[in-house]
Amino acid sequence: MENITTKKKVMLSGIQPSGDLHLGNYLGAVKNWSVLAEEFDCYYFMADLHSITVRQNPAELRRRSVSQLAQYIACGLDPEQNTLFIQSHVHEHAELGWILNCYTMFGELSRMTQFKDKSNKNAENINGGLFTYPALMAADILLYQADFVPVGEDQKQHCELTRDVAIRFNNLYGDTFKVPEPYIPQVGARIMSLGTPTAKMSKSDPQGCVFILDKPEDIARKFKRAVTDSDTENCVRYAPAEKPGVANLMSIYSAVTGRSFAEIEREFDGKGYGAFKPAVGEAVIETLRPIREESERMLADKAYLQQVYTNGAQRASAVARRTLRKVYKRVGFVEKPF
Ligand code: TYM
């Protein structure tokens, strides 16, 4: 009943534990989640159901799901103020996911960029789940009647599809779902690979990707090797089309220090990339250091983490159940007698 009695707006988001959390996940998503708890009723989860659309090593998936929870908390998500849970523990996600499959069109799903990207990368395993993934994501969001979905730029298309599905369902059956909006940060919404600045930072490219739990020396090395630009200008200037590598480093520096692009240009005026790259590395190291240390401390306390995800699933399920019951009724299922 939380969100009804407190009347707070609802925030909800998730991350697939298909890899360790990286700087893109942090700057595009988690960093912004932690500042919202006071004002909103917040739900954040480990999207393990989504992860198996690509083959996973089962032991690794389990380990990463719990490690991701430790990292959420270390990033500032207080489990008392935020409902933190593992998606597969709340069976309503899979159930509503199935129903929404029946209200999501083949043509809509065919247009999804993430589906096209992942099918190219996993040509030997283009399974049904990969295709219908956005219907499950819509279920994740709509179950909690979320107002806002804080995500990076790449998830905007899925959020828009969620809105379309919610509106379609509401038009057929009367108001059932809140129509949510994506909530995308001004800076950091699309962090690019340090090795290939025209490609999104992603776990599938470990050299161009900085992980939250990377050791400081590894982070420093990755930034020193970061691709800047082939121009001879050697000047720190924000020009994304001409200088995508520098623009990406500036975005990262801006997101971790809070400085504007103009301030960064002034700071490195006449200093060149040789000074700029290690400075970005240092700023990232200092941002991630307390998060890594706190994650490691928490990972040693498995009982605590288990208690957090147990409480989280119970709280989440109580809310999800209400929406699902309403949906079952609307579509014409016979009320369960037990
Ligand atoms: P996922 O697991 O790929 O990414 C998790 C979050 O990190 C953001 N992100 C980035 N932001 C900036 N730069 C990058 N290079 C970068 N890479 C990833 C993503 O935008 C996302 O916010 N489908 C979702 C997971 C999901 C979900 C949901 C999200 C499942 N159900 C319900 C919101 C609500 C996904 O694959 O994100």
Image (cartoon, rainbow, N blue to C red):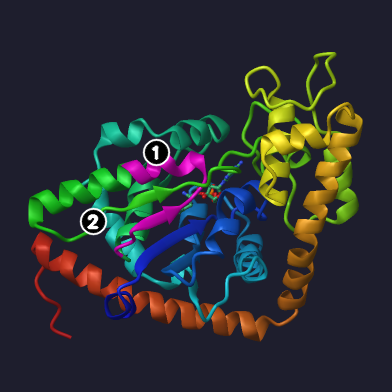
Q: Earlier in the sequence, mark 1 or mark 2?
A: 2
Q: Nearer the viewer, residue 338 or 46?
A: 46
Amino acid type for the residue under numbered disc 1: Gln
Q: Any atom of ligand 1 within 8 Å of the CB at mark 2?
A: no
The residue at which mark 1 appears reads as: 157
Q: Is residue 102 visible?
A: no
Residue at 22% x, 59% y is: 177
Q: Are marks 1 and 2 in contact (CB under 8 Å)?
A: no
Is residue 173 one of those drawn in magenta?
A: no
Q: Nearer the viewer, residue 310 or 84?
A: 84
> Which quadrant, please, contains the C terminus?
bottom left
* 222 relative to 292, above or below: above
Q: Residue 119 appears at what percent x and percent y?
A: 49, 33
**Magenta stretch in the rendered image:** 145-160
Residue 74 found in image quarter:
bottom right
Residue 60 occupies which quadrant of the picture?
Answer: bottom right
Q: Secondary structure at mark 1?
A: helix
| Front of the two marks 1 and 2 | 1
Q: Which mark is residue 99?
A: 2
Residue located 78% across and 21% down the image? 229
**Neighbours of disc 2 within 10 Å: few (<14), some (14-19), many (20+):** some
Residue 318: horizontal and vertical position, in percent? 33, 79
Label 2 amino acid? Ile
Left/right of residue 92 with respect to residue 296 in the rendered view: left
Can you say which quadrant of the picture contains the N terminus? Answer: bottom left
- Give the CA separation, mark 1 to mark 2: 20 Å
Residue 157 placement: quadrant: top left
Residue at image point 47% right, 78% down: 312
- Local packing at callout 1 (Cα closer than 10 Å; few below 14, some 14-19, many 20+) is some
